[in-house]
Amino acid sequence: MRITFLGHQGWRFESGNSSVLLDPILEDIGNGAVGLPVWPRRRLDFHKLAPLEAVIVSHEHADHFSLATLAALPPRCRIFISDLSSLAMGTAIAELGFAVTRFSALKSFSLCGLEITALPGLYNTLEPDTYALLVRDPRGGSFLTGIDTVPHPDVLAWLARHCPSRTLDNLTNNFVEPRQALVDDPTAWVRSRSVVAGNMLEFVEKFRPRRAVVSGQGWCFQGAKAKLNQSFFSVDNAWLTSAARELAAHVDWFEGAPGMRFELNGDALAVDRGPDVDEIARPDRTFVPAAIREPEPFPPWSGARTIPVDRLRKVRDFVVDDFGRILGAHAPNLMQRLYYLKFQALPSASATFGLTIRNAGARHAFELDYGRLTFAEVGAAAAGRAAIGIEIWASDLELLIGAEEDAFMIVESAVRIWTRVPELVDAPMLLETFLWFTPRFRPNEFLRAYRARIRELRAQPEAKHA
């Protein structure tokens, strides 16, 4: 078996005269209004990667599922998705013209003579549709990638019985620190590196790898957001690989680079660079701690600081008419903590959830009535007085309402979160605010957005599917 790293979390598996791709991304991640370039920049040509038997799309997050990438595939290629995938993703892929097969956990299937087994992780509300994958060939070569999962104890026991020692393991660097933590504390990135190093050591302890390749964090910002490159990637793969080599020196570590190729022959491993991935000039992503202290640390994801009055009215109506009930139904842990917050003595804050919507130079403030599950607009002087809350640009909330963007991509760089009671409601818990905006809960809305994207792709001269 030969494995080529395609960048970020994309892989090519070759056996015999055909190959399988896992989570390939051509140039830009995402299916929404704003795309982010893959980093390091590289060029993929599916003609060079042919013949392709199948493509596996691990889950629906924007850095794994790309309609533009799928539209460029040969039309007879089969697409495999997990049985946890939403109706929206499976239907959109089928409407691109592909045969879609769903795979299940612990039920192996074969592609290109390779045995592939999906392994469940711990349940994750942000990525509930993801499995780890174990790939084995008849000669004893094996590769394990956790993708975006956290290992379940039962899976570790399963591996101990069925594949206790792999030829190569993959450690995915999934660490993304929302800007809020860095803005509040410019030294937060130092503690973050310690946390990620601890996660790496836990990976080594649980999986006992002999060799491991580090992947992930494979995107960058461009245009007006390019300055975020120096203040966003505080724990990058180069640092993590270096730390791993020092702290777990008994493991042979590789920092994944697009085009890196691994030849697995039973327990033996050879590494070189393949000719099928062309790396091109990469933007500078060097982390500069001082860059965090910029005047406007939360630029709008959409790039639009202003939307017209009629569109702003629709956003406001959504907040007042619907958003409170949505939180009541889809943010159970947050609502539980809000219940207890009501009985706290807070001399300088209101014991409720606040939402501030930015548009141009104005901030429109709302507060949640816990009993009625409704938001009411409050005066500008009250903005931010709530004990916990979020601030988001009107243009970004408009994208989320229309199912036109990945919610957590917006959260990571363009949303300000605050909590004056971190012992009761910490910042990560406020992520539940955005759960309803995901395809799991809004498949019909996302399918409409995917169909609109497919129409755009088909209208392009180079479109592969008519």
Image (tube, rainbow, N blue to C red):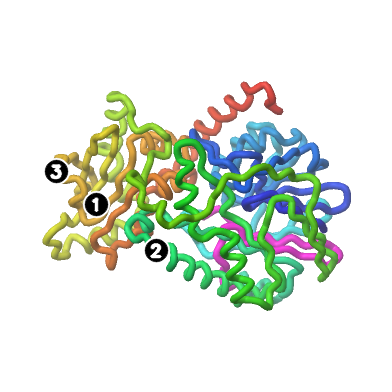
Residue 281: % across, % down: 65, 43
In the image, residue 392 lies in the stretch drawn in magenta = no
Question: Which segment is the magenta one?
Answer: 128-154
Q: Which of marks 3 and 2 is nearer the N terminus?
A: 2
Q: Mark 3, mark 2: which one is toward the viewer?
A: 2
Q: Is residue 48 left or right of residue 433?
A: right
Near-viewer residue (381 or 73):
381
Which of the 4 image quadrants contains residue 315?
Answer: top left
Gap between marks 1 and 3 measured at Cα: 16 Å
Q: Which amino acid does label 1 sit on?
A: Phe
Gap between marks 3 and 2 measured at Cα: 30 Å
Identify whether 371 is placed above or below 108: above
Q: Contact (CB < 8 A) between labels 1 and 3?
A: no
Q: Which mark is residue 188?
A: 2
Tell me the residue that label 1 is attached to.
Answer: 353
Q: Is residue 158 left or right of residue 177?
A: right
Residue at the spot x=68%, y=68% of the render? 253
Q: Earlier in the sequence, mark 1 or mark 2?
A: 2
Tell me the SS state at disc 3. helix
Residue 74: % across, % down: 76, 35
Which of the 4 image quadrants contains residue 160?
Answer: bottom right
Q: Contact (CB < 8 A) between labels 3 and 2?
A: no
Residue 162 appears in view: no
Residue at the spot x=29%, y=32% of the render? 360
Gap between marks 1 and 2 measured at Cα: 25 Å
Tell me the SS state at disc 1. strand
Tell me the SS state at disc 2. helix
Crowdedness of circle 1 by 10 Å Cα count: few (<14), some, many (20+)?
many
Identify whether 139 is placed above or below 305: below
Quarter occupied by the N terminus: bottom right
Query: Which residue is farthest left?
Result: 347
Tell me the residue that label 3 is attached to.
Answer: 381
